[in-house]
Amino acid sequence: MPQVYKNRILKFLKREEYTPLKPAQLAKALGVDEDAYPAFQTAFDELRQAGHVVVGAGNAIMLPSIAGQVVGHFRRNPKGFGFVVPLEPNAHGDLFIPPDSTGDAMTGDVVVAKVNRKGRRGPDVRLTGEIITVMERANNRFVGTLMRGPDTWLVQPDGTSFIEPIAVEDITAKNAREKDKVVVEILSYPTEKLLARGVIIEVLGRAGQYETEIRSIVHQYHLPGEFEDECLEQARAAAAFFTGQPAEGREDITNKVIVTIDPPDAKDFDDAISLETDTHGNWVLGVHIADVSHFIPPGSPLDEEAKQRGNTVYLPGKTIPMLPEVLSNGICSLQPDQRRFTKSAYMTYDADARVISRRYSNSVIRSSARLTYEQTDRVLKGHTKGVKKPVIGLLRNMEALARRIEARRTKEGMLHLDLPEPELVFDEAGRVVDAHPADTSYPHTIIEMFMVEANEAIASLLDRLNVPFMRRIHPDPDILSLKNMARLLKAMGIAMPRSPGRPDIQAVLDYVKGTEQALAVNMVVLRSLERALYAPTSIGHYALASRHYCHFTSPIRRYADLLVHRQFQFYVEDRVEVAKQIAAGQDLFATGKHITFTEERADDAEKELTEVLILQMLSKHIGDELQCVVTGLTGFGVFAQSEKYGIEGLIKLEDLGPDHWRFNKLAQCVVGERTGETIHLGRPLRVYIASVDVPSRKLNVVLVEPLGQGRTQRTPTKAERRAKRARGPKSKKSRRR
């Protein structure tokens, strides 16, 4: 149970701003409340006994000093040098590896590095490292584009984890052609003087084609493939025996008005809503969730496969399901006018949307209507043609209750982040031709509020029964993260206490809503928070201001929900003690770690494919203008995110204008030393596309009107921009003139 706290303690102690604290002070800095302090103390004691932390003078907690050798993950920089990130954190932090000391290590490899001391810099000893052994290779297969080099064929890897070309021979063995996307297996690893060498083991298709890019991402992220025959046979057998007739103890509510609301392209409908009033005039919300656990016994082939997959992967234009489609899109999906088994949670509310009571049951439903978010939004705005009156009434009541729940939860401290994701527009040939921010109309919030209420209700039930279960936790941000958030917002001209609470954060988010600063402020807040994860530890959910929380509402696409459904079933059967015994024999932390990984992998794969497809589209629009907002500042340039496409471009410092530009880390701004022109996070900028490098996922943009000069200078036309980029950069001599 204390593993989550171990990770948080070590992460906090590695922070550059950390100053040694006593145990009680450290717990307070991490936001550990009184109830959770025993688990924190256990975690700290185990770390100290293992030598991962030390207690110094005045009972102050520190990381141990760096040893003569360091074992860790190697991270290579494009300029040749790199860093070793220690597996066991130490007081020094990451170890710098000069270009001539990296050996044949590649990014992600587990290496042993010898620590060399290189004199002193002020009070600190300067340390560098030399890689002496590669213990474990992170990867020996890469996806990239085949190119013709001066002397040999080369594969340029996709992404940023490995950026150097790989030399390949005998491309005819797989009938590979120039500009094909291929999978290459490493035969010899790179050195300071020689490129890596490899062999092509698979040709994925022509680079740039949609299906090829899909296959590339699947290989790159090791996403699941087709289901094994025994899983398909199990799913087909379950479907063949399903009649929809409820067994004893299952509540039949097929006569109620119940609807599903999902995206237009959804096929796996796993949540449905009913809403009625009781004899006292109180709202009774029913959240009905597909009873997947009825069809998948624990330990069965399909259960083991679902556990390994962890979740459904949603890529642009392609879905990799957690369960075979005969279940996910068939008997488990809550399709309209079809009898389907569900697990139901009923919440009764007073006039202020406070929960009066809850009850739970297994049920069988028949959805009255399958609606999209857009259809629901139109109905709520009065466009009701073709929609049945009972459904119209239900939707209006749902909106009224959701707004009250939202108001209550906001008052309790729930945070509302506004970070719309890009939605791609495909032509008939399957090419991406445009993108725009995804729909965020209020029906999305209606469903979100109801799902949060149901998840919280189930978690509260299992907590009350003292049954171990898979929680969805979101740790409180540590005090250093909150102070850094306040400092960044202050640099943007937004006042906030040095250690803000949830009400302070939400007040700022409300203040900037609809303004040019909104995107940057929301990103600053997001980056200051921990990532939510799955674990059995009772920490609560910070962003939702919820003490008890789990995932219950999407068992078709999340294994965590399926686990919770099984614990819920023991409650329905009045076998709570059996649930406790079974949970005691499970390693819920290991399972939570795995499904957290698969969730993050799916998110990363979706984001990268979306980025690739947008970059491919933008590569045909060199010179076009974009309206952007500054979202990142570095010593080499300014990152600006397109409001339309949701993708970041880099403005190099030398492209900002005729001035000497310097990044002020303390003030969090880029400053022109001659003019005093200042660039902060959140500043709107008009840029044009200068270049696109799809394999390395880079978008370079240039200001339409350079800073630090008069506004009377004529803005170059699109044709002039294209011509300038085609000529290439000027010589150093001409630039000095």
Image: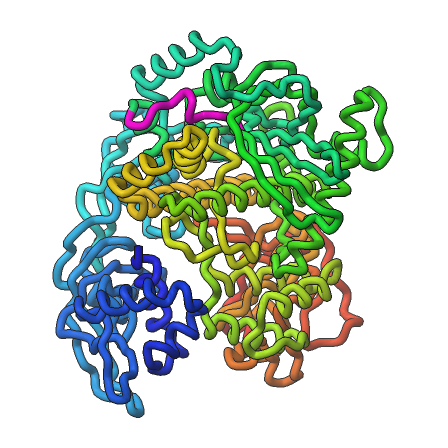
Quadrant occupied by the C terminus? bottom right
Q: Relative to 466, is 678 on the left or the right?
A: right
Residue 180 is at least partly visible in this image: no
Q: Can you name the residue that lies furthest to the front here?
A: 279
Q: Compared with residue 394, is residue 619 higher up or lower down, i.e. above or below?
A: below
Q: Which x, y percent locates residue 534?
A: 40, 47
Q: Is residue 247 left or right of residue 508?
A: left
Q: Nearer the viewer, residue 161 or 315?
A: 315
Q: Position of residue 704 (x, y in %)?
A: 70, 62
User: In the image, is residue 567 above or below residue 456?
Assistant: above
Give the quadrant of the N terminus: bottom left
Q: Residue at x 68, y 36 (%)?
A: 284
Above or below, 547 against 319 in this view is below
- Point out the stretch of residues depicted in magenta: 289-299
* Residue 598 location (% of width, % of height): 38, 41
Q: Nearer the viewer, residue 284 or 216?
A: 284
Q: Residue at x 22, y 77 (%)?
A: 54
- Relative to 429, say whether 460 is above or below: below
Q: Is 554 inside the magenta-drawn segment?
A: no
Q: Residue at x 65, y 74 (%)?
A: 492
**Render colour scheme:** rainbow
